Image (cartoon, rainbow, N blue to C red):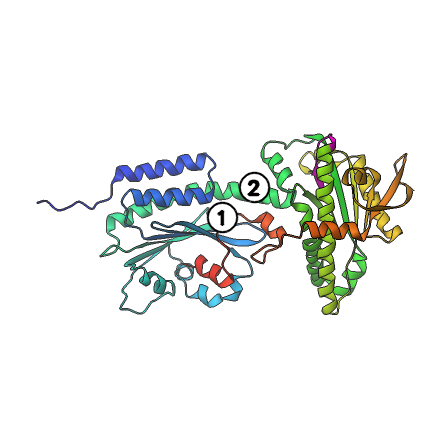
Amino acid sequence: MSPINNSVSEILLDKVADWLMRASLSDETLETLVRGFCERLAAAGLPLMRVHLSFSMLHPLYDALGFTWWRGKGVEVSGLRHEELALNPERFLRSPYYYLLNNNLDHVRRRIDPAEPSEFPIFDELKEHGATDYLAFMQPLGTDSDHGMVGSWTTDRHGGFSDDVIAALLKLQNHLAVAAKVAVLGKLADNMLTTYLGANAGRRVMSGQVRRGDGETVRAVLVMADMRESTMLAEREGRQAYIETLNGFFDAIATPFNRNGGQILSFVGDGFIAVYPCGRHKEPSEMASREAFAAVSAATARVAALNAERKRQGRDPIGYGIGLHVGNVMFGNVGLRDRLTFSVFGSAVNEVQRLQSLTKKYAHNVVASEAFVNYCGGDWATLGQEKLRGVRQKFTILYPKDAALAAIAEERPDDATQDGLSEAEHVMLLYRNTKQSPGPRGLIDKMLQ
């Protein structure tokens, strides 16, 4: 009887490579590419027990994004945040990837013998699963780029990887790198636009609204918020401490306005403007106004908690003002031909700006126009009528009674995140794992395998 042929099928490998090309041209996500690639390798007969792939990313929160595939278990996704690597530098220094970097190598292969001491910590875990062979690699995504792919292949086949399997993995590694680069660059572009322009504006730019003057007129609930006495805080705290204060303030006050239909369009100095697009009919205008007011209630509670913590630290409280309004705005591109910004413009924007500044005069943190209150409803008190600069008619100015804010807070408690990240971080996450995120040490371990 002739021996069984365990050689790798070139036809099936070509199928995997063709799928990678089609998937990258179809703008598939990195997660879809990795999952589909690993499952197809297994289906083609390659004896893979585990595959780990990590990609360095240009992202405000994350240094790298990692994917771990186990045979029969699918893919797990994890992100390594900038500060987390510093918590366990020894783990990185003892990882196969550091060995590759430190020795300027493309690959490192190690047979795994359960009777021998583990050269790298990850081998202890792999031994428990019966691993016999391990091949790690490094693949830059461009000669002048800091972005790249590192990964490892692990098998539990008796005798480890054969030469034809290693040749197949090296061949497909290049195809994966090309497809991953397309996906990474696309995600980077989307991520940067979302981070700096906001989700809605980012989508509009990605869909082709890139020329000066592109845009439309929409009706929206407008929110303008600003920090009080920021100049004094900046002088008293110093540059770095003030930046941390400003970020903490934005995390507290701005977070609620970036959910439930709200969109923060831009941060201007120590303030921001947010919108709740609502259309021209009464019902959507009422819904948007109530969502904005619920966000005001949450923001008020969050800033109060922030100031309580600052008091415990012996630091000054942070004052703020919020203005609320409803009106038509122009939403689109303005600026120079080669330097544009995407935001909202028009008289309603100017009006909500003036309204917000009236919180100083009336010593109330929140004020609103009569138009907003008519849609929002609730328990409000009139402060007076004001002639806003640049506006012909007078505005009736109102403020919410404490009972109104408390009722909203009780009705809709702030949905704090379960994993310790702020909402601002969740907005910018590249991917959300379906399971609860592991702790910092767990994340580091997953990224250095």
The N terminus appears in which quarter of the rendering? top left
Q: Note whether residue 405 is visible.
A: yes
Whether 278 is among the magenta residues is yes
Whether 264 is among the magenta residues is no
Relative depth, front residue between 317 and 160: 317
Q: What stretch is highlighted in magenta?
A: 275-282
Query: In the rendered view, would you say 99 is above or below 425?
Result: below
Q: Mark 1 is on which residue type?
A: Asp
What residue is rendered at 71% in x and 52% in y? 409
**Neighbourhood count class around disc 2 (C-alpha, 10 Å): few under 14, some 14–19, many 20 upward:** some
- The quadrant in which residue 180 appears is top left
Q: Position of residue 115 (x, y in %)?
A: 26, 68
Q: Mark 2 is on which residue type?
A: Asp
Q: Position of residue 284 (x, y in %)?
A: 70, 34
Q: Position of residue 423 (x, y in %)?
A: 62, 51
First of labels 1, 2 by sequence position = 1
What residue is rendered at 67% in x and 52% in y? 413
- The quadrant in which residue 448 appears is bottom left
Q: Where is residue 366 in the image (x, y as percent from the top left)?
A: 80, 49
Q: Mark 1 points at which residue?
A: 144
Comparing labels 1 and 2, the label whose residue is closer to the camera: 2
What residue is rendered at 42% in x and 36% in y? 23
* Count of numbered circles on the image: 2
What residue is rendered at 42% in x and 61% in y? 98
Relative depth, front residue between 332 and 100: 332
Relative depth, front residue between 57 and 369: 369
* Residue at the outermost left position: 1
The C terminus appears in which quarter of the rendering? bottom left
Q: Note whether residue 273 is visible.
A: no
Q: Name the residue under label 2.
A: 190
172 on left or right of 337: left
